Amino acid sequence: MEDTVSVHELKRLIETDSVRLIDVLPPEDFELRHIPGSKNACVYEMVFMDQIFDLLRGWDGKVVVYDYSGTTIAAKTAKAKLEQSGYHNVAVLKGGLQAWQAAGYVVEHSVTADEAPAEVDGVYLINQEKSVLEWSGRNINNRHHGRISIIDSSVILEDGRPILGQFELDMNTLTNIDILDDNWRAMLLRHLKSEDFFDVEHYPTVIFELRGAAPISGSTPGTPNMEIAGILTIKGTAHSICFPAVVVAQEDGSIKAQASINFDRTFWNVNYGSGKLFERLGMHLVHDFVSVELFIVARKPGTAAC
C-alpha cells in the first residue's frame, strides 16, 4: 500500500468512516489539538503497541498515523511498529497536523490553555536547592567527582536570551561522592581545598560573570541552543570562557539550563600535578582539564517556588 496520504485524501476517508486515525504524540499535545475522530497512542511510550491493540481491536481496515509537522520520524516510527505487529494497511499523514490545519480543516481541543504564556524576559533568581554543579577530575588511574553549592546567583533574560548574570560557588561546600572510605574522602577534600588546588581559605568563592549568549543555528531540542560567554574567576584569576548550553523556558514560568564544560585548570593557577608544569610526577600526575556539569533552575522573584 501507499506509505502516505494527503490531508484531502484523509478528509475523504474520514467522511466515509473507512479509516482509523492515530495521533502518535504525547497526551498533553493531543489534548491541546487533534484531528476530529482521532485517538491517541504516544509512540514514545513503551506501552505504545498495547494502546494500539486496544484502539484497533477488531479493525482490519486502513490506519493513518500522524505527528505534528511531518518533519520528524515520529509517525514513520509508529507506522513501522504497527507493520511489525501485523498491521499492513498503515499510512502516514503527509505534513502531519500542521498540514491539516494549513488546509483549513478544523481541529478538536480536549482542553484549552487558561492563560497566555508568561513573559520570559526579566530577572531570574537561581533556585539553590534545585540547581546543581557536579565536578570531575582525572588522572590516568582514577576519576573523582562531587558537587559544589551554587549561591547568590541571578541571570537577566532579554529576547529570550541570557544577557547578564552572576553565578557564585561556595568552595567550602565542595564534596566528593565517589570515595566510600571516610578517611580517604576527607584526605582528598583537604587536598582540593589546600593551596595545591583551590586555596579555599583565601579564595572561598568561584565566580562566573555571564556577559551574553548567542543562539546556535540549527539546534534541535536536546542539543545546545545557546553559546554562553563570560568571565570565570578562580583563585583571584579571571579569564574569558565560552561554552554551549541548553536554555529552555518552562510552562511553569521557570527557566532551566544545562551545560557540560571542560576547561584547563592551569589557566587559573590550579597547578598541582600538571604535566606541563612539573616533571617526573609519577602517581601524582593529574589531568589538566576539569569537567563541570551544570544544571540550573531559575525563577522570577515573587513567583511560586520552583
Image (cartoon, rainbow, N blue to C red):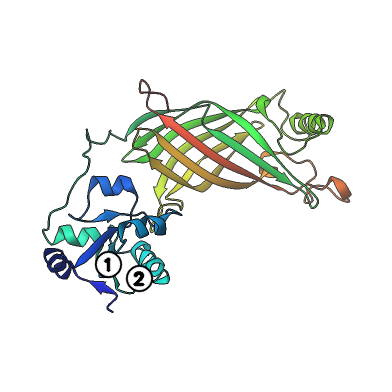
- Give yes or no for contact between labels 1 and 2 (Cβ–Cβ under 8 Å): yes
Name the outermost residue toward the front.
Answer: 58
Which residue does the numbered mark 1 point to in the structure image? 63
Name the outermost residue toward the top.
Answer: 302
Rendered position, 158 above or below 70: above
Tell me, yes or no, if residue 142 can be seen here.
Answer: yes
Q: Position of residue 67 (x, y in %)?
A: 30, 59
Observer-nearest residue: 17 or 194? 17
Observer-nearest residue: 295 or 76? 76
SS type, badge 1: strand
SS type, badge 2: loop
Tell me the residue at 24%/45% (across/down): 32
Tell me the residue at 42%/43% (across/down): 247
Rendered position, 29 above or below 304: below
- Residue type indicated by callout 1: Val
Q: Position of residue 112 (x, y in %)?
A: 21, 39
